[in-house]
Image: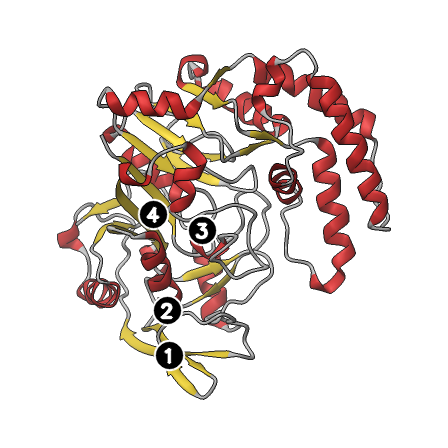
Amino acid sequence: MAVDLLLGLQWGDEGKGKIVDVLTNNYNIIARFQGGPNAGHTLEFDGIKHVLHTIPSGIFHDDAINVVGNGVVIDPVIFKKELDNLAQFDIDIQPRLLISRKAHLILPTHRLLDAASEASKGKAKIGSTLKGIGPTYMDKTGRNGLRVGDLELDNWKSKYRALANKHEAMIGFYNVDIQYDLNELETEFFDAIKTLKSLNFIDSEEYLHNAQLSGKKILAEGAQGSMLDIDFGTYPYVTSSNTTAAGACTGLGVAPGRIGSVIGIFKAYATRVGSGPFPTELFDEDGETMAKVGNEFGATTGRPRRCGWLDLVALKYAVQINGVTELMMMKADVLSGFKTIKVCTAYQYQGKEIEHLPYNIESENVKPVYTTLPGWKKDLTTLTSAKELPESLNEYIAFLEKKLEVPIKIVSVGPDRLQTIYR
């Protein structure tokens, strides 16, 4: 049985949480494969808005098992807060949430290191969420990290202390004024560890392998977006993990030949949180309208998102490197009311017009080339079927499908799970 993938194709915040929630009824297992609590997956149903950071987005479904894979980094404190928030909804967490022993732990000192590193960069800061993600992945690749499975060993606290002491020495290296009370942070951390240890730890690669053999349907859930991939994103303004399809193989232990459908999620326009190049960014009234109507604020940090027209050069690049087999377009409702809609179909780069993503897309190197399409006035938020979509929106979708050479199977017209149009 193949493992299907669902991932973001832009700079994150595409709406992956909603679509995982919508699709979960078709799967037995939802498995998160990378990233940490810098992700914010927003789900809305029954008049309630839920924001998840580490727990997979299938947790609200009684029949779905949710796996936090080995490629994820876990902050026990944030994880405990997520569980506490879910307690009011009478969810039987124990049998439906499984944690990979090979997932790495974010320590309090990882967050302090993150803050010190970012402060030391001054104006050159990368826009870190300051959740300790980068330093945790650095320890992972540096072979120093503490993993979930270590919590089952007698010497895990001594391993923790050795790593925390190393981190404190490193904080001093940055020579910035970071105020903290480690004793207070550790009290909260060790309390959260008790909660984490009450859950079921698994050898996730073996678990998922056996699940495939028994015919279980598995959906791998990504975090962030393809343009934030550590290798293929807009480096260095990226996250610290592989957000692309290949990350599901390393982040879950799934063989490449076992990958089935690759579902790519994108917004009908584009947004970006934090620093980094954004060729189609708008600084005018159109950008302000997108931000206001789309409620464009980070689900994890609350930071305002930068907004711009859809960038097909970057989107086509993401489709290619992920091997996307079907697309889902989010927030089409936000574009209602624009008289015309622009789509970037090429860049002006070094005196030439190109349609592929070059090495550097800083504003001094590339200028977007736009195609203008008619907009639509119709309010989409109450629509329930594809036949109700306005003609201009159908033209927009057809234009994108022709350029991307991949079908758009779902159009989202609002944040609620019911505001989903199947094509």
Q: Is residue 23 left or right of residue 171?
A: left
Q: Earlier in the sequence, mark 4 or mark 3?
A: 3
Q: Residues within 10 Å of mark 1 (few under 14, many from 20)?
A: some
What residue is at 36 percent from the left and 40 percent from the top? 18
Between 103 and 143, the one lying in front of the other is 143
Q: Residues within 10 Å of mark 2 (few under 14, many from 20)?
A: many
Q: Provide the residue designation for mark 2.
A: 313
Q: Provide the residue designation for mark 4.
A: 414
Between 291 and 175, the one lying in front of the other is 175
What residue is at 77 percent from the left and 27 percent from the top? 162
Q: Is residue 295 left or right of residue 388?
A: right
Q: Earlier in the sequence, mark 2 or mark 3?
A: 3
Q: Residues within 10 Å of mark 3 (few under 14, many from 20)?
A: many
Q: Earlier in the sequence, mark 1 or mark 4?
A: 1
**Relative to 326, does residue 135 appear above or below in the rendering?**
above
Mark 2 vs 3: CB contact within 8 A: no
Q: Earlier in the sequence, mark 2 or mark 1?
A: 2
Q: Earlier in the sequence, mark 3 or mark 1?
A: 3
Q: Amino acid at mark 2?
A: Val
Q: Provide the residue designation for mark 3.
A: 225
Mark 2 vs 1: CB contact within 8 A: yes
Instruction: Give the structural element (helix, strand or loop) at label 3.
Output: loop
Give me the C-alpha separation between circle 1 and circle 4: 34 Å
Q: Of the numbered discs in the image, which one, if any, rests on residue 354?
A: 1
Q: Earlier in the sequence, mark 2 or mark 4?
A: 2
Mark 3 vs mark 1: give the one in front: 1
Mark 1 vs 4: CB contact within 8 A: no
Q: Amino acid at mark 3?
A: Gly
Q: Amino acid at mark 1?
A: Ile
